[in-house]
Image: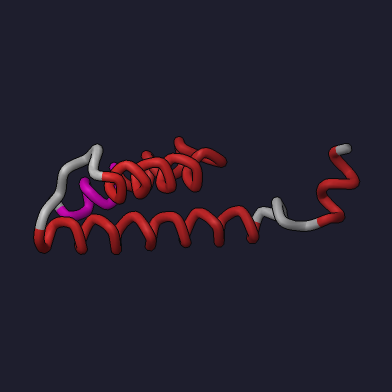
Amino acid sequence: MKAKIKNLLKKAWDLAKGNKTIFCLILLNLVEVGLIPLTGGWYAVVKVILITLTGGSLIDHYKSGHFSTKRMIKEG
């Protein structure tokens, strides 16, 4: 069961591609302003998960060269 969940999360992560950072930040902001109502421990847990996922997506962007000026010059 654990392998199935891990595989499903990996597929969802790969499917999101460049939109992971945007999606995670939108969810984090929705939680922060209260549009996704969470209280107590759930608020802290969800916030830590979303911040971790956002950081992971930024690392993916960095590794793929999206923050490099060399890549921007080649594409432009």
Image coordinates of residue 46 in percent, x first then y, are 23, 55
Residue drawn at (20%, 63%) of the image: 44
Residue ranking furthest to the front: 33
Image coordinates of residue 60 in percent, x first then y, are 56, 56
Q: In the rendered view, does 36 fall on the left or right side of 63? A: left
Image quadrant where residue 70 sits: bottom right
Mostly what secondary structure, the magenta segment?
helix
Residue drawn at (64%, 59%) of the image: 62
Image quadrant where residue 63 sits: bottom right
Residue drawn at (66%, 54%) of the image: 64
Image coordinates of residue 34 in percent, x first then y, are 23, 44
How does the figure colour the protein chain or chains?
A: secondary structure
Q: Nearer the viewer, residue 39 or 8?
A: 39
Residue drawn at (30%, 50%) of the image: 32
Check the picture and name the quadrant holding the C terminus.
top right
Q: Is residue 55 above or below residue 28?
A: below
Q: Reply yes or no: does residue 6 show up in magenta.
A: yes
Image coordinates of residue 68 in percent, x first then y, are 78, 57
Q: Nearer the viewer, residue 51 or 75?
A: 51
Q: Is residue 3 above or below residue 8?
A: below
How many labels sit on residues? 0
Q: Is residue 20 above or below residue 51?
A: above
Q: In the rendered view, does 4 fall on the left or right side of 26? A: left
The range drawn in magenta is 2-8
Q: Reply yes or no: does residue 22 show up in magenta.
A: no
